[in-house]
Image (spheres, rainbow, N blue to C red):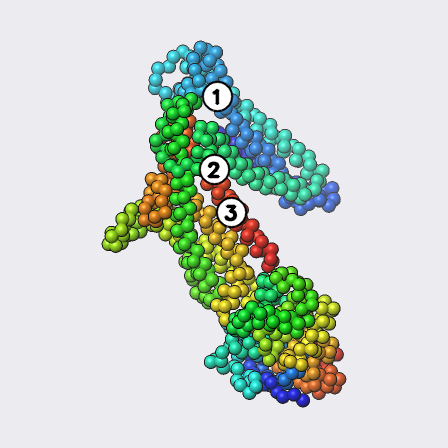
Amino acid sequence: MNFVLIFLITIFSLSLFFYGRSKTKSISIEKNIKLNALPKFYGYYLVLWCSIPSLVFLLIWTLFEPVIIKSIIIETAANQGAIFNDKNEANLIYEKIKAIYAGTYFGDIDIILKESALSYAKFINLFTNSKIVLIFGIVIASVIYSLKKIKNNNKARDDVEVILKGLLFASSLIAILTTLGIIFSLLFESIKFFSVINIFDYLFGTNWSPQRAFVSDASAITAAEYDELKDAFGFIPLIAGTSFIAFIAMLVAVPIGLFSGIYMAEYASVKIRRISKPIIEILAGIPTVVYGFFAALTVGPFFRQIGENLGLTVSSESALAAGLIMGIMIIPYVSSLSDDVINSVPQSLRDGSYAVGATKSETIKKVVIPAALPGIIGSVLLAVSRAIGETMIVVMAAGLAANLTINPLESTTTITTQIVMILVGDQEFDSPKTQSAFALGLTLFIATLVLNYIAQRAVKKYREKYD
Amino acid sequence: MNNVKIKSKNLNVYYGEKQALFDVNLDLNEKEVTALIGPSGCGKSTFIRCINRMNDVIDICKVSGNIEIDGVEINDKNLDVVSLRERVGMVFQKPNPFPKSIYDNISYGPKIHGKGETKSELDEIVENSLKKAALWEEVKDRLDEPGTGLSGGQQQRLCIARAISVNPEVILMDEPCSALDPIATAKIEELIDELKKTYTIVIVTHSMAQAVRVSQKTGFFHLGKLIEVGKTEKIFKNPDNKMTQDYITGRFG
């Protein structure tokens, strides 16, 4: 139904474009007046007026219709004598009613359900009909309004500008609201978690084993239970594992990325640059899951083999393997960003250095790199935030047990891995175990946010200096 | 008349397919200021960039012919460009101090060449260079502040001090005043007058008045060719060539 409506509105408003254009043309000829805008703007004006209000109305209606029908139906069912103790039972009955209406319900249908299903059908019909009527009303009203406007030779070009500005604003508003929505949902779930687990027990606890956290009744946790619980949600091993793997990744990515960035910017001929830069950037385009099984199936066992030959115990899921592969994944970020910042160091600085007799490498080391340093630091920080947020590689290659260790040959785990482990499979949404995933998500989000902020400040400071 | 310091013979320069200089033969005298004038794109800058081989930086640039400094050929593949540039300093059109402190801007060159091993020797080089560039009095209390924070004229004198710091024999100046206001320009010109006692100076300029004020010898370039060269006085009062006459009287250029 909605698709038909959207289709009709679109077709109608597009045809209005041609109408508006030719109409204003003929008006200008008939009355011999100069139009305030080109005829096509009157066409746009009609299109926008015809489509936007009706489509926005349709969107809002579609969002609220099920909610309203549901509350009405549940209320009528209750009036007819249906008994439900809480929200879940009410939802169940509502789903049954919907299934009966759709013809996919095969259980016993008692009189209450039957009556409710009938009234459900009635309301659906009523709502659909009134939706169609209202939309036609809106289309007609806005078309009449806009036709009147264009007949009065309005400044259609300016008006179109205003409407488009509004549209663009609405789009960015949606992006902002979505972000806020995500932040708040993280925040609310985390608050629930922290109402059970003391935030200090979480932040400074050294043991992470959420699978131990069985709670019979989350609303009434005894002191003895809490002692058990607070020991299950210690954040330290996770942040340690995350930072450790990110650190190994940076050990790989920063030197290689930076040096290849320097080579690309300072030494490579145009021809080499044109070929090799896209190749390096392909590294960034490989799906992380591919890196993941490369780390888990090739690099991890390879390290274990080497370790065995050397007489070392190497876990087949090790921080080293995950960090190494993650580092390779991040190389293009570092190299491409530092290539850009090095390229934007003005040639005049290099000339100044050559002119006092410095060689190329002296110039790079003492003039170019220091001048580009804020930008390079920015690119490294962006890479760090990429590393700590990376999920797939560590899920596959770093291990699941939260060991607090600094031995790169042992398995460790990360924040992202634990979020995945907690949320895969069936979950009870009111257990602290599930909620802890949101707390982890929030912590991770804050960490990357801070890093990104610092990185962007650093890059900006650098830009100000040379632009 | 002073001795000839720099001598170019049949110098040709190409940027890719385009020839920028045609058979330039020009002698530059020691401890004298030579001004190179001519309309934009005539090859003046290209010429002085041959003297310290700065054209090497540009991939597509090819230089043929000879340039001698003190009778030694410098347009030679095997020549040590680094030590050449130690002897031939350069000041650019736009002041280009490094984004470092004033002190580090000056000490950069000496450190690279291993001059000024101790801190006090280095301090002395910095002080002397800044004094020679007539900047010492203005910056002596803030040597650790960034060189980029100085005014345009001060930045340019800082760049001159940087060029002086490695104790060169020749200083090349590529329109050093074109980005400066008249007062800063006057200071630089005064400075050039002082510097010519110690250094051989080649200055590219668009200002005829500046050439008259600062130089003893003037060369006029047009379309990559050296049209006329001679004593500044003669070039501006009584040039041999009609084209020179037209240029200095402002009929083209």
- Name which residue lies at 61% across and 42% down: A164
* Residue B20 visible in image: no
Q: Which mark is residue A70?
A: 1
Say what secondary structure mark 2 lies in: helix
- Name which residue lies at 66% across and 72% down: B131
Q: How crowded is mark 1: few (under 14 residues within 10 Å), some or many (20 or more)?
A: some
Residue behind mark 3: A452
Give the answer, above or below, for where A418 lies relative to B147.
Answer: above
Q: Distance between the residues labelled 2 and 3?
A: 15 Å
Q: How crowded is mark 2: few (under 14 residues within 10 Å), some or many (20 or more)?
A: many
Q: Residues within 10 Å of mark 3 (few under 14, many from 20)?
A: many
Give the answer, above or below, for where B87 lies relative to A147.
Answer: below
- Name which residue lies at 71% across and 68% down: B184
- Chain of residue at mark 3: A
Residue behind mark 2: A442
Q: Distance between the residues labelled 3 and 1?
A: 44 Å
Q: Earlier in the sequence, mark 1 or mark 2?
A: 1
Q: Quadrant of the N terminus of chain B?
A: bottom right
Q: Distance between the residues labelled 1 and 2?
A: 33 Å
Under mark 2, the amino acid is Leu
Tags 1 and 2 both on a single chain: yes
Under mark 3, the amino acid is Asn
Q: Earlier in the sequence, mark 2 or mark 3?
A: 2
* Residue B120 visible in image: yes
Classify residue A101 by image quadrant.
Answer: top left
Q: Quadrant of the C terminus of chain B?
A: bottom right
Residue A351 lies, in percent from the top left, at 56, 69
Q: Is the residue under label 2 in contact with that under label 1 (CB below 8 Å)?
A: no
- Chain of residue at mark 2: A
Q: Is the residue under label 1 in contact with that under label 3 (CB below 8 Å)?
A: no
Say what secondary structure mark 3 lies in: helix
Tags 3 and 1 both on a single chain: yes
